[in-house]
Amino acid sequence: MSNTERQISVPANPEPATPEALKKSADGWWRTQSATMALLKHAYHQIGTSEKRIAEQDRLIRQLEDLAATDPLTGLMNRRGFEKFFDHEQARIRRQHSPGALFALIDLDNFKPINDTHGHLAGDACLKLVSEKLLQSIRILDGAARFGGDEFALLLTQIEPENAMLRLQKIRHMLDDISIEWLGEKIHFGASIGIEVVTADCSYTDVYNAADKNLYADKQRRRKSAIKKA
């Protein structure tokens, strides 16, 4: 058989498609498009649902992280949160993005007698009041924490140590003049403070230990002063 014979013959004038055939072809095309659009819609819905689920998980993770770094009674940072804040500020000092910082360790004077005499609810009220006063006395750039019991800490950031000392003196005066009304009785209390300058080279442990030593010395000085006044 020759190549010519193998060729498929095509009618010179093919018959036009009937309306029924065109309609059937169009219906098939629309069904295909509808199915595709339905699949796309389902896929977008699944993506949206997954994104919402991920966003919700991220929100819950942030909440748990905040709770893990926050003191439940006062709302201040706890020790863990404060140490992270300290590390962040010290990194700024090392990068020369901060002129310095001042760490202050605060311990309320004669706090145990308040709990023993007036009850733990009165003691909690004192702790909350101190927390509120500390937050009112610092900038948004600074950090405040409660480590537990009646021990608090401040980190005055992005400030020259000399200027930080002046601000801390105002905080000291505020704490010396603090009191609450409890069941018709006014409860007065003060606080001892130990401070230490934060540099680029010091460790958190070194700063804490130095401030704690200065805190003990301040507490002893205040006790002797109170005895003399009595």
Image (cartoon, helix red, strand yellow):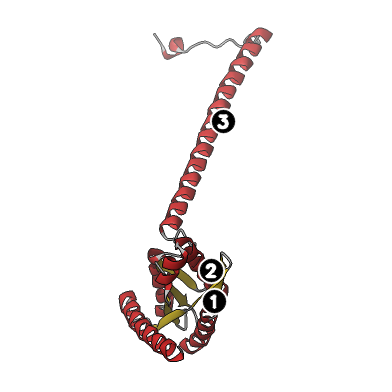
Q: Residue at x 47, y 84 (%)?
A: 99
Front residue of 136 and 92: 136
Q: Residue at x 48, y 39 (%)?
A: 50
The three-letter code of the residue at mark 3 reads Lys
Q: Residue 191, located in which quarter of the rendered image?
A: bottom left
- Check disc 3 and report the residue beneath it: 41
Residue 185 place in picture, x, y as percent: 56, 70
In front: mark 3 or mark 1? 1
Q: Secondary structure at mark 1?
A: strand
Label 2: few (<14), some (14–19) or many (≥20) C-alpha neighbours in 10 Å? some
Disc nearer the start of the sequence (3/1): 3
Front residue of 213 and 21: 213
- Check disc 2 and report the residue beneath it: 129
Q: Secondary structure at mark 2?
A: helix
Q: Residue 223, located in which quarter of the rendered image?
A: bottom left
Q: Which mark is residue 39?
A: none
Q: Which mark is residue 178?
A: 1
In front: mark 2 or mark 3? 2
Front residue of 158 and 166: 166
Residue 163 place in picture, x, y as percent: 51, 87
Residue 55 place in picture, x, y as percent: 50, 46
Q: Are circles 2 and 1 on residues that touch, CB within 8 Å?
A: yes
Q: CA distance from mark 3 to mark 1?
A: 63 Å
User: Relative to 160, is 206 on the left or the right?
Assistant: left
